Amino acid sequence: MSDELELIRQTAAQFCAEHGGAEVLRTRRAGQPGDDALFDACVAQGFMGVALAEEHGGMDLGWPALVALIKEGGKALIELPVLSAHQLPIEALLGCQGGATRSQRLAELSSGRRAAVAWQSEARRPDVFAPSVQATHAADGWRLSGRATMVLGGLGASGYVVSARCDDGQMVCWVDRDAAGLEVQAQALIDHRNSARLVFDEVLVADAQLLARGGPAREAIKRMLDAGRLGLAAQMVGGAQASFEMTLEYLKTRQQFGVPIGSFQALQHRISQVFIRLQMAEAALRIGVDQFALGGVERARAAALAKAQCGEAYSLASREGVQLHGGIGVTDEHDIGFHLKSAQVGSVLFGDVHSCRSTWAALAGY
């Protein structure tokens, strides 16, 4: 890691220590599902735009810097909105054709405006190319009807990049939060991350707000999907590392029969398996970061691999953490249980382990 990235990591670690932890999740569970204060703090800290090119108003530090930020958030049990409420809409916009609307939105996002991507249908296994929002052409533009669910970072967003079905397959457009006919509903997840359901009732979208149609729209959503997988992989690696370190420390200090339980060979084997999985996940994440700028099949395969490996590592680390902590691991007062919930939600977002492995294999021609 370069000195610049290490400085970013240290800054993020200090930030997350101040703004993260299980107490934040308990607050959201108590009826405050949004994360506006966290978003504003990220803007004030200068986290937004770290991976965005200078020509669009960003810092042009690339995905290595963004991953360093997101990993620290995963360790601290918070989803830093630099991914869901910033980088995902940016990636979708970058994948669209050029135009005044695209340039305007990129400039707004780089200056601290909040947005989210609405792409997922309510199907049990949502198809990224089959959104449940329907776009119908009208004399004054387009009319959107239907629902988009699991919109990460959707609460508090001032606008949305929306994927919808249209007469030539798929389209991507911009919808302002205050558009007539749009309802934003809080969606409760077991790990309490910011998620919303958008309900569109004949929402008018002017032609100027159309970002892409047909093939270009599919490419924009593909890019956003790859970014989502890679970002979630980074978050889950951070969570897996925190779970591993927390459990390892417990094995060293918890005593039974007068000796630390970490001296028992069976428990040593179990924590060793977590360590091995964590190393594999770290390697897959590095490949994903290296391959993202290549685009196309290389980016898609690397992102899918990273999501699968990191998801498995986090699931194993958090499950073993709960098991090895014993009864306290399932109580509300211990953080390891929150890691288990975060792993369960993160593993299914943007495709579960099996879906990501299928993507990796299909793109390789298997």
Image: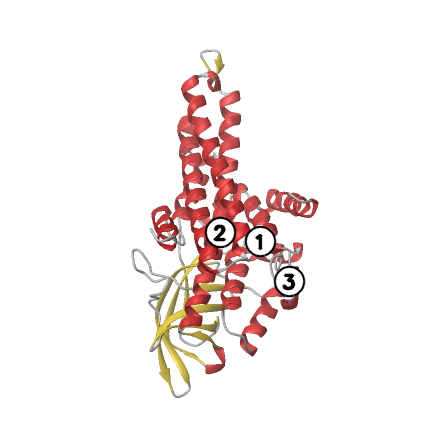
Element carrying mark 3: loop
Residue at x-position 46% and y-position 18%: 261
- Spatial separation of the CA atoms under disc 2 and disc 3: 20 Å
Question: Considering the image in quadrants, where does the N terminus appear?
Answer: top right
Residue 274 drawn at (x, y percent)? 45, 32
Tag 2 and tag 3, C-beta contact below 8 Å:
no
Residue 58 disc label? 3
Could you say which disc has been placed on residue 230 in the image?
2
Where is residue 257? Give x, y as percent.
44, 11
Label pair 1/2, CB-CB below 8 angstroms: yes
What is the secondary structure assignment of the residue under circle 1? helix
Q: Tell me if residue 349 comes above or below residue 22 in the rendering.
A: below
Image position, residue 11 (x, y; %): 66, 46
Q: Are marks 3 and 1 in contact (CB under 8 Å)?
A: no
Secondary structure type for disc 2: helix
Which of pointers 3 and 1 lies earlier in the amino acid sequence? 3
Q: Tell me the distance, in whole angstroms, between the alpha carbons under discs 3 and 1.
A: 12 Å
Residue 256: image quadrant is top left
Outermost residue, front side: 365
Type of colouring = secondary structure
* Image-quadrant location for residue 264: top left
Type of amino acid at the residue the image marks with label 3: Gly
Quarter where residue 314 is shown = top left
Of label 1 and label 2, which has the lower sequence position? 1
Q: Which residue is mark 1?
A: 63
- Name the residue rendered at 48%, 53% in the picture: 32
Disc 1/disc 2 C-alpha distance (Å): 9 Å
